[in-house]
Image (cartoon, rainbow, N blue to C red):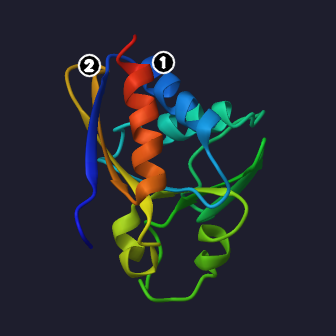
Amino acid sequence: MADGQMYVFHTRSVEETQALAEKIGRLTEPGDVFTLSGDLGAGKTSFTQGLARGMGVNGVVNSPTFTIIKEYMGRLPLFHMDVYRVEDELEDLGFDEYFYGDGVTVVEWPQMIAEQLPAERCEIVITRGEGDERTLKFTAHGRRYETLCEAIKHDHSGN
């Protein structure tokens, strides 16, 4: 895959990470796909909780570790996937209906299904710093995600 435009954000707390994700959640559109990579405890679920809040999802959002996919209803449907336990990368679990449907999809551990991911998506890698500090590297694959990241960059720099 051709390299996309990269954007880097720094947060100093779980709340800041969630606030950044909440801003993105407010701008989501049907068919948006976000992949989340990072070590255990990096903040993938915290990010998804903020995204869900921005999309108007009420209720508890937690990691779908044992179910693969959890669905939440907000302004748009939110499909939260944890594909760490998918045994066969090419097994057809019907991901296309999520990736190309009317909801927003978040995929944790995307490398497990790399061949099935849509070419246009926003890849997010979260790395831990000191304490609760995080670095979030967004790679925008496609004009839609470049526009989204630019909007967040301008909004985030005002913090």
| Residue 108 versus residue 47 in the image, above or below | below
Q: Secondary structure at mark 2?
A: loop
Quadrant holding the C terminus: top left
Residue receiving disc 2: 131
The answer to whether residue 23 is above or below residue 106 is above
**Residue lying at 40% horizontally and 60% vertically, measured from the top left:** 142
Q: Nearer the viewer, residue 23 or 48?
A: 23
Question: Residue 15: which numbered mark, if any?
Answer: 1
User: Crowding near pointer 2: few (<14 within 10 Å), some, many (20+)?
Assistant: few
Q: Position of residue 45 (x, y in %)?
A: 50, 41
Q: Residue furthest top?
A: 159
User: Marks 2 and 1, how far apart in space?
Assistant: 13 Å
Which amino acid lies under the numbered mark 2 shown in the image of this protein?
A: Gly
32 horizontally vs 126: left or right: right
Please name the residue shown 56% across and 60% down the image: 81
User: Residue 4 at x, y = what percent?
Assistant: 28, 57
